[in-house]
Image (tube, helix red, strand yellow):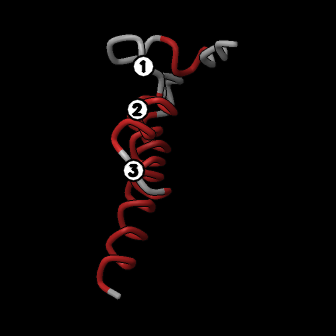
Amino acid sequence: MKTEIPKRYASRTVEGHDVISMVKILGLNFNEGNILKYLLRDKGENKQDLEKIITYAQRELEHLNK
């Protein structure tokens, strides 16, 4: 059974792969997956999405520095 891609991501697929598929294929962790998710969202709130990307990038950096 194929899951339907949410509308806010539908226009931002890569060779037919949605965000969840790309996270699995690339072996991304939670923070990296969320960075990708917010990069690929298409909902017209770019500033808010960029702020979320920064937050998850800072969290990943903190994790890597431990």
In the image, taking residue 64 as reference, residue 56 lies left or right, namely right
In the image, taking residue 52 as reference, residue 54 lies left or right, namely left
Helix, strand or loop status at disc 3: loop
Helix, strand or loop status at disc 1: loop
- Point out the tag, 1 or 3, that comes first from the N-terminus: 1
**Which is more toward the observer, 65 or 57?**
65
Q: Which residue shows up at 45% across the image and 11% down it?
A: 11
Mark seen at residue 32 = none
Task: Assess whether mark 2 and mark 1 are in contact (beta carbons under 8 angstroms).
Answer: yes
Residue 9 appears at what percent x and percent y?
52, 21
Q: Which residue shows up at 32% across the image and 72% down it?
A: 61
Residue 3 appears at what percent x and percent y?
66, 17
Distance from the alpha carbon under mark 1 to that under mark 2 = 6 Å
In the image, taking residue 42 as reference, residue 6 lies left or right, namely right
For the C terminus, which image quadrant? Answer: bottom left
Q: Is residue 66 above or below residue 64?
A: below
Q: Which residue appears farthest toward the front when viewing the image?
A: 1
Identify residue for label 1. Answer: 17
Identify residue for label 3. Answer: 28
Helix, strand or loop status at disc 2: helix
Distance from the alpha carbon under mark 2 to that under mark 3 = 8 Å
Q: Which residue shows up at 39% across the image and 77% down it?
A: 63
Task: Assess whether mark 3 and mark 1 are in contact (beta carbons under 8 angstroms).
Answer: no
Distance from the alpha carbon under mark 1 to that under mark 3 = 15 Å
The quadrant in which residue 24 appears is top left
**Which is more toward the observer, 27 or 54?**
27
Amino acid type at image mark 3: Leu
Amino acid type at image mark 1: His
**Which is more toward the observer, 23 or 49?**
23
